[in-house]
Image: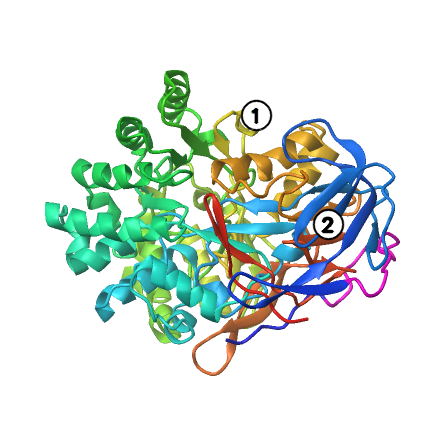
Amino acid sequence: MHHMRSIFASPWDGFTERSCIVTVCNNLGSKPNGDGRVAMNFRLLIKGGTVVDGSGAAAYPSDVRVSGGRITEIGQALSSTVGERVIDATGCYVTPGFIESHNHWDGGVWWAPNMEPLPAYGITTSINGNCGFSMAPAPKNPEDRQSIIEIFNFFEDIPEEPMEKNVPWDWETWSEYKASMLRNVTVPVNFAAFCGHIPMRLYVMGQEAWTRAATSDEIQKMCALLDDALAAGALGLSSNQLDHDKFERPLPSQLADDAEYRALLEVVARYDGATFQVVVDHFFHMTGPKQVERLGRMAKETGARMHWLGLPTLKYALEGGKPSALLHEQFKAEGGAEIWTAYHHVSPTSVINFGRSLVFAQNGNPVWQEVVNAKTWDEKSALLTDPDWLARARVAWDQDTYSHSYLRDSTKLTFKESESGWGPVGITLADYIEQSGIAHPSDALADWVFKNGAESVVHKQSLPNDDDAMLAMFRDSRSVGNVSDGGAHGKMFCGNGDNVLLLTEYVRDRAILSIEEAVHVMTGKLAYFFGLNDRGLIEQGKVADIAVFNLAEIERRPEEKIWDVLDGKGGRTYRYTRAPAPMRLTLVNGVPIFDNGAFTGRFPGDFIGPEQSMVLAMAAE
């Protein structure tokens, strides 16, 4: 495995000489892990900070002592001991490390294990295997395995080439996948994952998973695969009732009947802390309320904990989402099995390129998606200049694109980057129409893309969230926040660093959420929900996943390109990341992963699951 370079060694704009980190030498010891490897034992005393413990309780001034990967003491005016490093946290908050509740780092950890920029943003746990997409079970048949790779590529912008060439695929079951991760991958943050419904169906049913319901024998085989995963520490089962693929086919999980779902939910219900996750549709075909009702009732009947993505918070979707909102309240009032809804405080992905993007397909424009799906520039440019395609594209733009989509508003589309350098950039599609004299927005966009290239980038303005709906989600007793999609959409960019935007926009700048609330929804509340009971709180005896930061210093920094994604041809292609927020300090299992303004190059992340924690990796100092 190749470790990519870190961008964190460089200074960032606007941050002054730091004064809070004081090092006392000889603070490093070691101890054996359960699997025989040697772990670093950092002895640290974080002094003078304000503790926000992740429970939602009021912040308080206190020192925090860390040793052996655990929080060993909390109190005021603690004295340092010989060989203990002292961290001056004056003016800083000391919080649990932040949990990314919905990531897609499944593929990326195999070729970009630094997981940039998560360490610089105080992230200490990454939840993966979401949306019904996971790396296991891995079908034996190459065609079925390729379906999994293509699904990750189309829906999450995970590049095919390194998925095919850098991932060993030396597993079939989920437990074997986890064992391969333990052998082959080191990561800086804790890693957890669901078992995906879609690969499970492909493993058992092959290509027929796309076209029919499962037989009773096939359902039993899927249940055995899920049982293997949950016994090995998977977070639960993830499924998908939202997406159609690039051929407009509903994903295989949408062919599952009630008998299949019920059997799988009965397996989930047998495992304490396990969860059934399903993504539903409040955007395309508006089947969300029907699926929430259907699957929520089965979850109640089987006793399986469920969370669904998610109750709409975008202004345009509030009316259509009312039936789901009523169901959410009804499920809470009924008691019994817990049913939670999910949300994110940042509007979905809003950057388009023309080499790898699902934005057109997910906004109801299949004709423009043909350009994205075309494999070579010759094929793409032929479409962009073909009169018949241009005519079809105009019709799709005017008639097929969803009425609420900002693709319909040329003032909301900004030319951001040009691959060829032809330009112009920094202007809107509406400006280009005026300058070029090309009347129809589809024709004008085709002209610009033809001149600028497939890797050119257009920014689509994000649809606005509703403040009241957001606050209701932050404070809802059964809501799962921080659904960032980080690790996906590297060329469209989303997710990474959004956690800090919650702290700055909602707490610091607009003062509509308290620091205690914001930290709680990204730490203790999520740790409880996912069954990660040994972390998520600043509490004596808990695992020392900790973030230290000054609220005045941090920002969700602007995106920037780095060329660290293997292209399968001996070179690299790009993805977007961010400069550090920065945290003053990020600890994972008591080990500094971001410190003194830089990624430390340490990889102490564990492979964690409900009620348990198994070591994923520990790099030697």
| Residue at 74 percent of width and 35 percent of height | 508
In the image, taking residue 19 as reference, residue 265 lies left or right, namely: left
Instruction: Please say whether residue 314 is visible from this viewpoint.
Output: no
Amino acid type assigned to the residue bearing label 1 in the image: Arg
| Magenta-span inclusion, residue 19 | yes
Front residue of 9 and 27: 27
Seen at 79% across and 62% down, the residue is 27
Q: Colour mode? A: rainbow
Q: Position of residue 177 (x, y in %)?
A: 37, 63
Measured as percent of width and height from the top left, residue 351 is found at 51, 54
Q: Nearer the viewer, residue 423 or 75?
A: 75
User: Residue 207's quadrant in the figure?
Assistant: bottom left
Name the spot of residue 176 as percent of width and height, x first.
Answer: 35, 63
Q: Which residues are magenta?
A: 9-27
Q: Earlier in the sequence, mark 1 or mark 2?
A: 2
Majority SS type along the magenta span? loop
- Crowding at dot 1, Cα within 10 Å, few <14 / some 14-19 / many 20+, comes out as some
On screen, residue 65 above or below 281: below
* Element assignment for label 1: helix
Identify residue for label 2.
66
Q: Which residue is mark 1?
A: 475
